[in-house]
Image (cartoon, grey):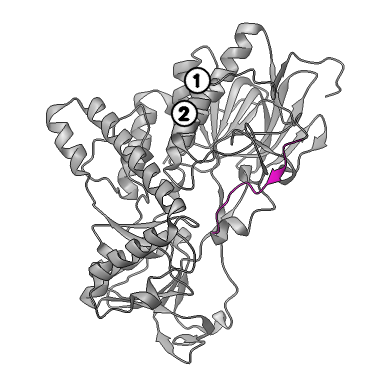
């Protein structure tokens, strides 16, 4: 059980960080290192730190990126597993917080419901509920590290006649502790990262599993261990070995992404051929593992050591590509006329995407519709002062962008301190910049939420790079005073 620290109403912090997950703990580390004089608090809605890695408890939960890039830049990943299980990642996050005294700044059970900016005072008033009781805090700067999906509800399609099913229906986001999978027939609906993780894990628990997908995703086997990292550790210090492995994986990932975008047909053929090699010449790869879209239009599903393919070859798992006609008392009726028997149905149907944890935002009394703002450098909103949000890469590890974002926010705050400034606001002052969707990604959870997301612009600094190397140059070494991010002191002429 988490220790609850005293939350004193009306207390002012230089920075409030919302969320004590991977991003929030990382943001606190950067703040302590780069802005040591700043006071801060981390407000966490749940009773424990860790975010995603504490929330998700389904069998097999693991990273979908290698830990040498999903791990923090400043803390070497020393576990042997490159694709790591959720419990090990959670230990890593909490160890980071303990080692650096960050855990002492976390206020648990604090749900941020509203933030109001006053130009007169150059301050955010943050409204919080704790155990149902409202209170307020103030801050000069707010960092939103609350993730991109709803913790309260996953995406649940309205399946016909779902109430007729006599067994148990489970969403992976809310996995029950009492579910015994042994000798059960389990149908997993979905084809994304969660589904391909669940299938072999449920097989290992003694279940007979069917992965039912409407259409295939790209699936590629990756080694569970990084052999380069293992060799480097024998000769180099943990930090140096980690840094070299991290850069190796960054460069390889970037190279593969660019190759997939430039030569999608060739990369698609190669990915499908690799699945064919893993499953054998008699397997219907064309039906079950040939997506309709190009590589990296959606995120690639990595399976460590090919565990999904091993489960299929063993006969403990099968893949069915079809659509659902209706649920029945004993399973699922398919549009093709087939039937799938099931004791348990797992709806691995995705996340419900949110922006800023669904808090209400206002500037000088005027409500902010985030969906009508433009994203500045992928981390601030146009015309919203002193607020940054962390949103990682869709084509690489989340933490790569999170580290750069936190670094840049510290640079901005230090820039203001040196010049006696209090306010940093991105302004859309270039009429030639046109609006574009925030993400060029066709995953369902993103397309369902596009109206909620800010826009990106047609040119920098409003255009997203989705490229770690370009962002590293721009955010670590680029000008702070770029003409778009405008600075000022508190404005007494403005009404709060």
Compared to residue 8, the image places residue 285 above or below, namely below
Main SS of the magenta part reads loop
Q: Residue 140's image quarter?
A: top right
Q: Earlier in the sequence, mark 2 or mark 1?
A: 2
Compared to residue 140, the image places residue 4 above or below, namely below
Check residue 434 for magenta coloring: yes
Q: Position of residue 22 (x, y in %)?
A: 44, 38
Q: Position of residue 174 (x, y in %)?
A: 47, 60
Q: Which residue is mark 1?
A: 477
Check residue 361 for magenta coloring: no
Residue 398 is at least partly visible in this image? yes
Q: Nearer the viewer, residue 170 or 285?
A: 285
Q: CA distance from mark 2 to mark 1?
A: 8 Å
Q: Is residue 197 left or right of residue 30?
A: left
Q: Secondary structure at mark 2?
A: helix
Confirm or deny contact between disc 2 and disc 1 (CB under 8 A): yes
Q: Nearer the viewer, residue 294 or 122?
A: 294
Q: Which residue is mark 2?
A: 472
Q: Secondary structure at mark 1?
A: helix
Mark 2, Cα crowd under 10 Å, few <14 / some 14-19 / many 20+, is some
Image point 76% across, 39% down: which residue?
Answer: 368
Image point 34% across, 66% down: which residue?
Answer: 272
Q: Which residues are magenta?
A: 432-442
Q: Residue 116's image quarter?
A: top right
């Amino acid at each position: 059980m988490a220790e609850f620290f005293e939350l004193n109403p009306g207390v002012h912090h230089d920075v409030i960080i919302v969320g004590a997950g991977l991003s929030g703990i990382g943001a606190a580390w950067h703040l302590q290192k780069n802005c040591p004089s700043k006071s801060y608090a981390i407000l966490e809605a749940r009773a424990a730190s860790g975010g995603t890695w504490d929330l998700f408890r389904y069998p097999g939960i693991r990273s979908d990126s290698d830990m040498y890039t999903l791990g923090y830049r400043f803390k070497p990943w020393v576990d042997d597993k490159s694709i790591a299980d959720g419990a090990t990642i959670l230990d890593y996050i909490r160890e980071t917080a303990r080692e650096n005294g960050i855990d002492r700044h976390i206020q648990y059970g604090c749900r941020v419901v509203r933030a109001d900016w006053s130009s007169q005072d150059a301050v955010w008033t943050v409204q919080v509920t704790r155990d149902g009781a409202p209170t307020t805090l103030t801050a000069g700067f707010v960092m939103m590290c609350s993730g991109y999906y709803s913790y309260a509800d996953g995406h649940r399609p309205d399946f016909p006649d779902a109430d007729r099913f006599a067994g148990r229906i489970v969403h992976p986001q809310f996995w029950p502790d009492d579910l015994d999978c042994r000798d059960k027939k389990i149908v997993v609906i979905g084809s994304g990262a969660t589904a391909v993780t669940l299938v072999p894990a449920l097989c290992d628990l003694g279940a007979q599993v069917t992965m039912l997908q409407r259409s295939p995703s790209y699936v590629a086997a990756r080694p569970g261990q990084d052999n380069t990292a293992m060799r480097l550790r024998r000769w180099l210090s943990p930090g140096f070995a980690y840094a070299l492995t991290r850069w190796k994986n960054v460069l390889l990932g970037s190279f593969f992404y660019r190759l997939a975008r430039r030569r999608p047909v060739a990369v698609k053929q190669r990915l499908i051929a690799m699945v064919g090699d893993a499953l054998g010449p008699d397997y219907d790869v064309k039906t079950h593992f040939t997506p309709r879209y190009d590589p990296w239009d959606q995120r690639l599903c990595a399976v460590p050591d090919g565990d999904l393919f091993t489960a299929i070859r063993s006969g403990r798992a099968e893949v069915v590509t079809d659509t659902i006609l209706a649920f029945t008392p004993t399973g699922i009726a398919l549009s093709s006329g087939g039937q799938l028997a099931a004791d348990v149905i797992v709806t691995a149907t995705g996340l419900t995407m949110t922006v800023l944890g669904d808090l209400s935002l206002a500037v000088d009394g005027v409500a902010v519709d985030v969906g009508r703002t433009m994203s500045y450098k992928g981390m601030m909103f146009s015309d919203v002062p002193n607020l940054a949000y962390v949103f990682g890469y869709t084509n690489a590890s989340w933490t790569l962008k999170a580290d750069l974002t936190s670094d840049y926010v510290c640079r901005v705050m230090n820039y203001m301190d040196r010049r006696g400034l209090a306010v940093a606001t991105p302004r859309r002052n270039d009429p030639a910049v046109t609006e574009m969707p925030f993400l060029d990604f066709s995953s369902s959870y993103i397309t369902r939420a596009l109206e909620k997301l800010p826009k990106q612009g047609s040119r920098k600094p409003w255009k997203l790079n989705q490229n770690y190397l370009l962002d590293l140059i721009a955010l670590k070494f680029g000008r702070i005073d770029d003409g778009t991010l405008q600075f000022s002191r508190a404005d007494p002429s403005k009404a709060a």
